[in-house]
Amino acid sequence: FDDFDGFAEMVKQHIAARNDDATVRVQLQKSRRAGLFAIGIGVFLLAIAVANIWMAHEEQRTSRLLAEQGAPGEADVVRRFLAPNGVTCRLEYRVTSPVAADEVRNAEVTRDYWDSLEGVETVPVIVVPDEPAISRLAEGEVYDDDPTTSPTVMYVVSAVIAVISLISIGAGILQWRGWEIDLDSGKISIKRIGTRT
């Protein structure tokens, strides 16, 4: 062949270019899978954050309504039992006055109060008349005073989770669109998959 060396070099360049294209396609497929996974994790975390915010809001609302509108009432004892750990005393009750509630509430009570309820059919409660589903026992109920479960802490934790979820969703969208975060150069940069710079 005339100019065999030139022909060989041209073939090598052609093969290298094809390999680069194939590599980019494989990288893009992997990036899209990783992007979908990151988006899924982000959406899941965002749902947890929203649920936590809703629960914290409901807890604050319940406490406020009981403090502002709570009235003495009566409730039927539905069930008096020990929790599966065999130690924690529980009482299920349904409000019957001043207005009836369909929901059964399950409350933790002190051991002394639990013992005093043997054979008792009704208990005194504090209830919100406009929302009889919101109630508490007038006495003997055990309240969770763990500061890590307070609404304020739940709001802060939910905000952190929401930020993480949004970062995950953003990174997933970038990956799906063929961009990657490059940390190799010593600084954070975003580049399109397949580019060297």
Image (cartoon, helix red, strand yellow):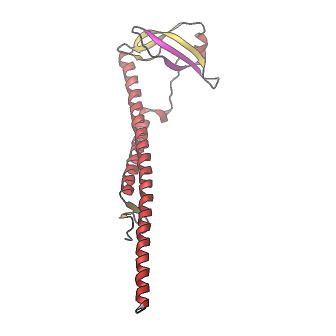
- Say which of 19 and 114 sits in front: 19
Q: Is residue 147 above or below residue 102?
A: below
Residue 98 screen position, x and y as percent: 40, 8
Task: Please say whether residue 99 is one of the residues in the magenta stretch.
Answer: yes
Task: Please say whether residue 38 is one of the residues in the magenta stretch.
Answer: no
Residue found at the far front of this picture? 1
Q: What residue is drawn where x is 48% and y is 33%?
A: 149
Q: What residue is drawn where x is 37% and y is 25%?
A: 61
Residue 107 screen position, x and y as percent: 52, 20
Q: What residue is drawn where x is 38% and y is 30%?
A: 57
Is there any visible trace of residue 154 in the rendered image? yes
Residue found at the far bottom of this picture? 2
Is there any visible trace of residue 139 in the rendered image? no
Q: Is residue 185 above or below residue 46?
A: below
Q: Is residue 66 above or below residue 155?
A: above
Residue 91 screen position, x and y as percent: 55, 16
- Say which of 109 and 119 sits in front: 119
Q: Which secondary structure dominates the residues rendered in magenta?
A: strand
- Say which of 103 and 53 sits in front: 103
Callout count: 0
Residue found at the far right of this picture? 86
Residue 195 screen position, x and y as percent: 37, 69
Q: Which region shows up in magenta?
A: 89-111
Q: Which part of the image, by quadrant, shows the N terminus?
A: bottom left
Q: What residue is drawn where x is 41% and y is 64%?
A: 25
Q: Which part of the image, by quadrant, shows the C terminus?
A: bottom left
